[in-house]
Amino acid sequence: MVQYFLPTGMRYSILEERKSFYTDEFNLEKVAQWFGSLSGKVKFAVIIGRHTKIYPKKYEEDATTTIIVDEYSSLGDVRQQIIEFLPEAVYYDRNVYDPDDRITGQELAFDLDPENITCPVHGTLAEKMKRRQGLSFCELELEMVKQEAVSLCDFLSSRFSEVRTVYSGRGFHLHVLDHEAYRFSKQERQNLAAIVKKEGFHIDEWVTSGEMRLIRLPYSLNGLVSRIVLPLKNEELERFDPIHDERTLPVFLKQVTF
Ligand SMILES: [Zn+2]
């Protein structure tokens, strides 16, 4: 198994930790608030053990697949299904569906990941991939990607009225919740992604263009780094400490010293 290098204190979560997090800590009220302005049913998705190779034995065959969770009665029911799978990652589908399951729009989002940053120590993504360290990242890369998030937030805020920033546990996501952005065509999304890349931002174009429609669920556990996915106030982003901020630490990490 390839072990990735991560900043100090970050590590995979084991099954018991995922279970205690989703049983005792996962904040459904805050999840509900996140989707507050959205009408229509949200589809969720889980990946049990694609990167960590940590999964309940009975789900061995499904460990690397993306499992859609779209049949549920309440968020409490979603929580129960998550506790059943004990996934390394939980996502939601940015597509908006009408009651007949037709897509009526898609939330516009931007994904900034630290591995895409060229690091003075670890080099380019290609160099990291060559060492099979494509998912590794260091504190310097995390700081650099945070600065990109600050700039991208400014850039987007000059064009849209409702931009939200989320710390994903590895990098940062910027969500645009303006109604007009939900209705953008694929071409408009691709054009915007190209503009943003040209401005020098290391975004994942698949996310912005919409081909990758899943995005990490705020307040879920990122099981690759044992951090809680945390929405931030845009004005606090600059001084946010992604490695030590208490709000991102699950209880199981607070109980040990490192
Ligand atoms: Zn580095």
Image (spheres, helix red, strand yellow):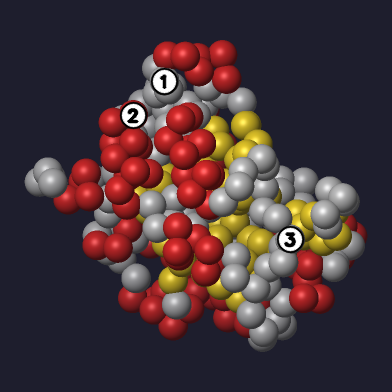
Helix, strand or loop at label 3? It is loop
Does label 3 or label 2 sit earlier along the sequence?
2
> Left or right: where does residue 137 sit relative to residue 125?
left
Spatial CA span between label 3 and label 2: 32 Å
Please say whether residue 64 is visible from this viewpoint. yes
Mark seen at residue 15: 2
Residue at 56% x, 23% y is 64
In the figure, residue 188 lies in which quadrant?
bottom right
Between the residue at mark 3 and the residue at mark 1, the CA separation in whole angstroms equals: 32 Å
Assign a secondary structure to mark 1. loop
The numbered mark, 2 or 1, whose residue comes first in the sequence reads: 2
Residue 109 image point, x, y percent = 66, 62
Q: Residue 221 appears at what percent x and percent y?
A: 40, 47
CB under 8 Å between callouts 3 and 1? Answer: no
Q: Residue furthest left?
A: 257
Dot 3 or dot 1, earlier in sequence: 3
Q: Secondary structure at mark 2?
A: helix
The residue to which callout 1 is attached is 56
Instruction: Name the residue beneath numbered marker 3.
Output: 40
